[in-house]
Structures are given as C-alpha cells and as structure tokens.
Amino acid sequence: MGSQAAVASDIGPEGFWNTYSRYYDSIYQLMPYRKLLWDAFQALDLRTGARVLDAGCGTGNFEHFIAEKGHPPIEIDAVDFSPLMLERARRKCARLDHVRFAQADLNDALPFPDDTFDRIVSINVLYALSDQDRHLSELLRVLRPEGLLVVSSPIPDFKWGPLVSEHFGRIGNIWGTGRRARTVAASIRVLATSAWGSFAVDKLVISRREYSGEYRSFGEAELGWLLERHRADGLGAYSIQPAMARQNLFATASKMLPT
C-alpha cells in the first residue's frame, strides 16, 4: 500500500484521488470522524424540502451516515472530482433516491444557478483546492440567502495519532463488555488493513503537497481571515471550532439577505 501511495504522489489530481478512493472508507470506522459527520448533520438543521449540496462528497460517507440517523425529506446534490470516489458513493448509496451524484471540479465554477441550495456542506476538501477564495465565492453564490454553510478542513500538521487515541477512548463508553470487545476487534482489523493505505497517502502524498504549497491547510486565525474576505459575497455570522480530535477545524456560517 505504501508503494501505491508513493506512486500516487507523482500522478495528477484525478489519478491521486482515484487511488485514495481505495482506502478512504477506512476513516469511516473512526469515531472522531463519525462525530464530525454528526456535528455537520446537526449544524445543517435540515428541514423538510431543503435542497442540499455536498461539495466534495468523496465516497458518500455523509449521505450514508445521515440516512442511518434519519432526516426529513430533502434533496441532495453530491459532487466530487474523482470518478472512482463517485463510483463507490453510488454503490454505497444505491438505495437513497433523494441523492444525485455528479462529477465536478471544485476548482472551477459550480454547475448550478445562483441561490440554488438551502444548505451546503464541504468536508475535508478546502485544503486541497488551488483557489480557495474562488471556491468559497462559488459556495456562497449557489447558497440561498439565510442558507447555512458548513465547512470542515484539516489543520496544518494533521496527525492520525489523536484520532486513533480518541477512537479507542470512546470505545470505553460503549455499553456492554461484548459490544466493546467486538468494536475493539473490528477497529484493530481496519487499522491493520485498509487504514494503512490512508496513513500512507497522508504521509507520502498529502503532507508532501502541503509542504510544497500545492495544498494549504488552515489554522483557526487563517480560516477566519479567509471567511472574512467573503463578506462581499454575502457571508454573515460564522463560528470556528476544533473537531475530529482537534485535527480539523469546523466552521459554520450563514448567508445574509441582500441589502
């Protein structure tokens, strides 16, 4: 797996994310990541009839997660750059007739009219885009006034250790010795197999691209400055909190009514 990740560091964006799709679902097994999905679900405050954009849906983890939790009748447009990510997402969410998957390059203009969506979520995407300001302008363009935006992105020097540590700490809160034991065993199996691909991709590809300046993660102050630059696009009140074992930042924002 490490050799495949090393090869991925030398290929273009589509090839890289297609390669990463083989391992990406391993993160779904980590409780801090599922807590991040839960926080996004809660922050979106979904209402009956809402139209939602998942900008950078990956393998459909968010759609799969909230379907398990239950939500009112909504429509979701889920877009991603990688054909193989989308292929996995469509298989995973085959029974979800309220979700439409489509390929889109989030470095370009979004293929939607102004004021299309009531809610927008973008998880673990912003850091990998070449023009983050343009992306936020596009998200705000297609978000309806008084709509809500949720963005989460990894911090600089992202580490896997705190996620794994918090994951096993949370297992201690599971009721029942048998359930805890089964969860520990399942976690060890994932960490010993597919999760190593994610670790390798992070260390051999993402970290190198971050160091070279191709990718750019944000600290809290930097993310705040980025958001502030979009007041002219209608950005209203926002908040930024740590998430996912403090290895991600979690921002929520509203879009103001036009003056």
Image: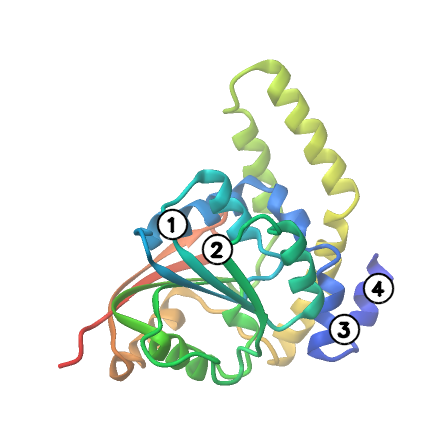
Q: Earlier in the sequence, mark 4 or mark 2?
A: 4
Q: Quadrant of the N terminus?
A: bottom right
Position of 6 relative to 67 (above/below): below
Q: Residue furthest front?
A: 97
Q: Amino acid at mark 1?
A: Pro
Judging by the rendered image, the residue that carries numbered circle 4 is: 4
Q: Which x, y percent locates residue 248?
A: 48, 57
Residue at point 33%, 52% (across, down) = 46
Q: Amino acid at mark 2?
A: His
Judging by the rendered image, the residue that carries numbered circle 1 is: 73
Q: Which x, y percent locates residue 84?
A: 71, 65
Circle 1/circle 2 CB separation < 8 Å:
yes
Q: Which x, y percent locates residue 252?
A: 33, 60
Q: Amino acid at mark 4?
A: Gln
Asked if residue 91 can be seen in this view, the reply is: yes
Position of 116 relative to 92 (above/below): below
